[in-house]
Amino acid sequence: MNRTTILTVVVALASLGGAVAMRPGPAPQVSYEDTGQLLFPSFTDPQQAASLEVIGWDETAAKNTSFKVELKDGRWTIPSHNDYPADGTERMGKAAASFIDVKKDIYRGDRPEDQSSFGLDDPTDPNAKERGQRITIKDASGTVLSDVIIGKKVEDKEGYRYVRLPDQKRVYAVKIDVDISTNFTDWIEKDLLLLEQDQVVSFMSDTYKVDESQGKVTGSDPFLVKKDATDPEGASWLLGEGSTGVEGKELDPFKVKQAIGGLDRLQIVGVRPRPEMLTLQALQSKGFFVTRDGSRLYGNEGEVKAICDDGVVYNLYFGEVTYDSGLALTAGQEGAEPAAKPEDEAAAKKDANRYMFVDVFYDPTNDSKSTPGGNPEDAPGAKRAKQLSARFGKWFYVISDASFKQIRKAKAEFFKDAPAGSGATPAAPAGKDDKKGATKVEPKKKP
């Protein structure tokens, strides 16, 4: 190898060494003076929390969504749903605790143009690409305890999320376990009717329909069953006086139990406030009609009645179908047109929900638990009915089609094939009989 060749090799090696030396190494983890500090140092007790608001973005509707739970006059309510009562104590405590002792663990940048990649764009910005979820918690005085935008999960660190404060550019990855539902049904009392299945001693179903234009009730055939008092296990049912069976069939106690069980487990999917003064328009818009003398209410898809052993009587009236979704379903939207029925029949069945009107009163003649000779107004059943009436008197409810079908059954569905020679289902002993209501109602006015 001559001298020129040797010099060429040396120069090449030197260039290679310089290139290696200049290669960028792993970016060092940047630390700022607040790295490791608490995200919300003054928020130390979850019981301080008196309101929670979650602001997000509905891609389908292309608009902001806001869900809020607030403590008012000692009760948790949902302002976005006309202050409907919330079962919020436990769930709020868990939500608030999610933000206590959370630290600014890892700095991830200060550039506004990078916020989309972290899923931290402002959820109220209609032009944003990757919006986060803004969660704000305040105390009873309105002081902010925590206010943060939550972004994407950190891919290389389990249990970490990208976050930033709404008025700041800096992004941190923090270890946080946050699971805050904005689903209306997750925040409310699951047991709507506060009814136990074993309390029901009598059940009535009438699957009539209302001809809205003619103002007529058609197809009324009340089906009444009463618990057999001679059965020590309380599992047998008898036809009530005035009710007729189905030829060749016998009463199926399982179907009766199934319908009453549907009442016990009934859950709602939405609410609408009832006006203090109920008008024909308010009722008819939800599928409810009254007789011309105002003494009787009808639902355009029938009703059921459950009488309890303490004299509490539940009347459930079934009204109009709604195909709304999202906030329009759970809370309604003032002045908005109701969603149209989907053209596809399968989609229509899937999206169908129904308005329900609940009325409760006390009937001392059906109270087997009160003290004989006592004042009916002092009976536990009377007091319970008064509380329930106040609970239900403020709302129209929306229930799923599945719940509707489980409770409101055609008369034939309560019967099964009778064994040969078994005879008809016996009627209950003579007793108080329900009077049939009028068949004329106020017709629906054309808009």
Image (cartoon, grey):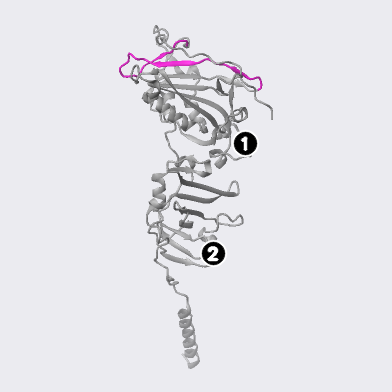
Q: From which residue to which does the magenta span run?
A: 213-242
Task: Please name the residue shown 46% across and 60% down the image.
Answer: 162
Decide whether residue 240 is among the magenta residues: yes
Outermost residue toward the left in this view? 232
Q: Which residue is mark 2?
A: 114
Residue 39: image x %, image y %?
42, 61
Instruction: Specify the quadrant of the image occupied by residue 88.
Output: top left
Residue 58 visible? The answer is: no
Outermost residue toward the right in this view? 447
Q: Which mark is residue 338?
A: 1
Q: Amino acid at mark 1?
A: Pro
Q: Earlier in the sequence, mark 1 or mark 2?
A: 2
Q: Secondary structure at mark 1?
A: loop
Q: Main secondary structure of the magenta part?
A: loop
Decide whether residue 363 is among the magenta residues: no
Residue 8 visible? The answer is: yes
